[in-house]
Amino acid sequence: MSHTPEPWKTDRTSSKSLDDEWEIFTESPINFIAEFIEKNNAQRIVACVNGCAGLNPAAYRACVEALRKAHSTISDECEGGVDHPVARLVFDALAHAEGGQP
C-alpha cells in the first residue's frame, strides 16, 4: 500500500470557526490528508513525512544505533578522538537524529 506522495504541507484550517486547528495537505494535486489537528502535531507529522521521503523509516532505529557505535569507535580509536572531523560529523548527525541540534 502506498501513501500520499511528498511534500506534505500544513496550514490553518479554512474553517473560520476553528482558529487554532490545522490541516495537512498536498498541493499538486490538492489532497487533504487530515484536518482539525493542533498546530504542533500537524507540524511534527509533516516534518516526519517529508524528512523520511525516499528513506525506509523502518530502518531509522538501526541507523541511529550504527551512528552511536561509529561515534564510540571513532572517539576511542582515532587520533584526535571526538575532535576528529569524522567524529564531529557522526556526533552532529546523532545529536540531530536524537532531537538535539547538530
Image (spheres, rainbow, N blue to C red):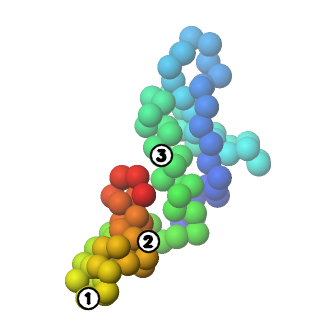
The residue wearing badge 2 is 89
Where residue 47 sits in the image (x, y, percent)?
A: 51, 49
Mark 3 secondary-structure assignment? helix
Location of the N terminus (image quadrant): bottom right
As drawn, 98 above or below 63: above
Nearest to N terminus: mark 3 or mark 1: 3
Q: Which mark is residue 45?
A: 3
Where residue 78 sits in the image (x, y, percent)?
A: 31, 87
Alpha carbon distance from label 3 to label 2? 26 Å
Amino acid carrying mark 2 in the image = Leu
As drawn, 28 above or below 61: above
Where residue 13 sits in the image (x, y, percent)?
A: 60, 25
- Left or right: 17 in relation to 73: right
Alpha carbon distance from label 1 to label 2? 16 Å
Amino acid carrying mark 3 in the image = Ile
The residue wearing badge 1 is 77
Mark 2 secondary-structure assignment? helix
Taking the spot 59% from the left edge, 26% from the top edge, the residue there is 12
Q: Classify 10 Å Cα crowding around label 1: few (below 14), some (14-19), many (20 and above).
A: few
Where residue 36 sits in the image (x, y, percent)?
A: 50, 28
Q: Give yes or no for contact between labels 3 and 2 (Cβ–Cβ under 8 Å).
A: no
As drawn, 74 above or below 35: below
Give 11 or 23, whichever is nearer the viewer: 11
- Left or right: 38 in relation to 30: left
Nearest to N terminus: mark 3 or mark 2: 3
Q: Residue farthest to the front?
A: 80
Amino acid carrying mark 1 in the image = Glu
Give 90 or 40, whichever is nearer the viewer: 90
Q: Give yes or no for contact between labels 1 and 2 (Cβ–Cβ under 8 Å).
A: no
Q: Classify 10 Å Cα crowding around label 3: few (below 14), some (14-19), many (20 and above).
A: some
